[in-house]
Image (cartoon, rainbow, N blue to C red):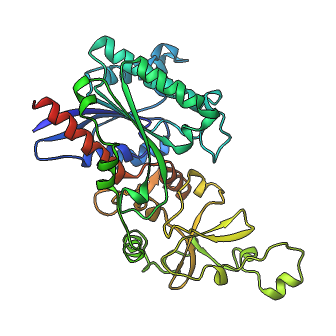
């Protein structure tokens, strides 16, 4: 079986890695050599689920150990540098940090240090090119707003730098709910770079006809079936009380008419009245009003779900109103929790915090979309190599 090697930057909890790992056909598959991630909590989740090398730390120091501030740190990063440049890779992937470009953030772009992390991708491509050869394929994912950020100038710079490395760049914004069975409204840009002329000629993934074949036409009944697969409606308040919204814990979210009349509030929220349908997703927006997601699926999961953000999806279940559990958010991204993928239970001897799991799910990619695209890439590579 033909094997194509993969390296992964900004790996998070392994969504892109898992997508590539799942992609295969009867003649070819991908082999994950290494992944890089800096966040300690995300690394714990990643190590819980993958056996290949995880380069834990700042990618800038992985590529340039000489910038380390101590001998101990320099030796550590020299070891990681040896691994990342040990052998060539066929595919370099990465969901480089999106906070600098996201409409959910301040949109500082390259002025934000996280925005400049993209330049490490260019750095690694050039290093691999000097020592071996440049990766044959680039696969990058980011927020939809990347294309529009700074009136298009940000993406123009990114594309020019990738093209300067010798790649033909293709990009497309795809919605998770349209190209997978996952009931989540999540638009992301998927950037594919190819360096081989024959691969470029064969590339048709983003053609209208191909995308039409990949498109998922779902009825409302099918959506409900998909929702039942990721939401645990058997979970009870007795077993998971901390996820439930009650008047005792959130008095401002259960305001009666009488209480409202005797208050100075401009808007009345009563979750019991306003969240009234099963198999639907709601949000309490900025603590001012309740909104049902019009698409009939979960709204885009965000990283601030567990850190005080106001975009926490809420659902009606048999015994009340609750937010999604960490397991459910991971399943909404296509991670097979309980079926080959395991969330960590401890970190440094303490219970693993839900807030970190919510953050990880919000930052993650939709695994089945990655699998679909990487399988299409695999067809191109195999066809080229067999002709």
Q: Nearer the viewer, residue 225 or 52?
A: 225
Q: Is residue 62 visible?
A: no
Looking at the image, residue 37 sits to the left or right of residue 113; the answer is: left
Looking at the image, residue 349 sits to the left or right of residue 167; the answer is: right
Q: Give the quarter of the figure containing the N terminus.
A: top left
Residue 34 x/y as whole percent: 31, 33
Residue 264 x/y as whole percent: 90, 74
Residue 77: quarter of image? top left
Q: Give the quarter of the figure containing the C terminus.
A: top left
Q: Looking at the image, which residue sits at the far front?
A: 209
Residue 263 x/y as whole percent: 88, 78
Q: Nearer the viewer, residue 158 or 30?
A: 158
Q: Nearer the viewer, residue 66 or 196?
A: 196
Residue 106: quarter of image? top right
Number of disc labels: 0
Looking at the image, residue 4 sits to the left or right of residue 252; the answer is: left
Give me the residue at 48% from left, 46% from top.
Answer: 41
Reply above or below: 270 against 48.
below
Reply above or below: 193 against 369.
above
Give me the residue at 65% from left, 44% from top.
Answer: 105
Residue 180 x/y as whole percent: 36, 58
Give me the residue at 25% from left, 30% from top.
Answer: 201
Give me the residue at 44% from left, 39% from top.
Answer: 95
Q: Looking at the image, which residue sits at the far bottom?
A: 258
Q: Is residue 237 visible?
A: yes
Reply above or below: 232 against 7.
below
């Amino acid at each position: 079986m033909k094997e194509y090697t993969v390296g992964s930057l900004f790996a998070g909890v392994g969504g892109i890695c898992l997508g590539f790992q799942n992609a295969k056909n009867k003649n070819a598959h991908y082999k994950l050599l290494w992944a890089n991630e800096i966040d300690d909590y995300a690394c714990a989740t990643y190590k819980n689920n993958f056996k290949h090398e995880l380069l834990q730390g700042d990618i800038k120091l992985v590529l340039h150990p000489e910038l380390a501030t101590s001998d101990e740190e320099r030796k550590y990063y020299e070891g990681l540098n040896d691994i990342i440049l040990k052998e060539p890779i066929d595919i370099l992937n990465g969901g480089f940090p999106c906070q600098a470009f996201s409409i959910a953030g301040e949109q500082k772009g390259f002025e934000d240090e996280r925005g400049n992390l993209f330049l490490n991708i260019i750095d690694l491509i050039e290093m691999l090119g000097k020592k071996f050869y440049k990766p044959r394929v680039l696969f990058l994912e980011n927020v939809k707003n990347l294309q529009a950020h700074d009136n298009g100038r940000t993406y123009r710079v990114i594309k020019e730098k990738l093209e300067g490395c010798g790649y033909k760049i293709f990009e497309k914004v795809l919605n998770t709910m349209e190209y997978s069975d996952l009931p989540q409204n999540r638009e992301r840009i998927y950037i594919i770079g190819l360096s081989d002329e024959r691969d470029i000629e064969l590339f048709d993934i983003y053609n209208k006809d191909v995308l039409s074949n990949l498109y998922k036409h779902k009825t409302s009944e099918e959506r409900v079936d998909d929702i039942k697969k990721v939401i645990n409606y058997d979970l009870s308040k007795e077993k998971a009380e901390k996820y439930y919204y009650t008047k005792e814990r959130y008095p401002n979210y259960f305001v009666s008419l009488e209480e409202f009349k005797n208050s100075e509030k401009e808007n009345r929220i009563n979750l019991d009245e306003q969240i009234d349908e099963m198999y639907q997703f709601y949000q309490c927006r900025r603590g001012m009003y309740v909104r049902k997601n019009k698409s009939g699926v979960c709204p885009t999961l965000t990283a601030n779900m567990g850190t005080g953000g106001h975009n926490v999806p809420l659902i009606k279940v048999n015994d009340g109103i609750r937010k999604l559990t960490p397991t459910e958010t991971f399943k909404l991204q296509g991670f097979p929790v309980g079926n080959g993928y395991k969330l960590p239970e401890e970190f440094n001897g303490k219970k693993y915090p839900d807030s970190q799991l919510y953050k990880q799910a919000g930052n993650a990619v939709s695994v089945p979309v990655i699998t679909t695209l990487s399988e299409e890439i695999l067809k191109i590579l195999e066809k080229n190599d067999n002709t």
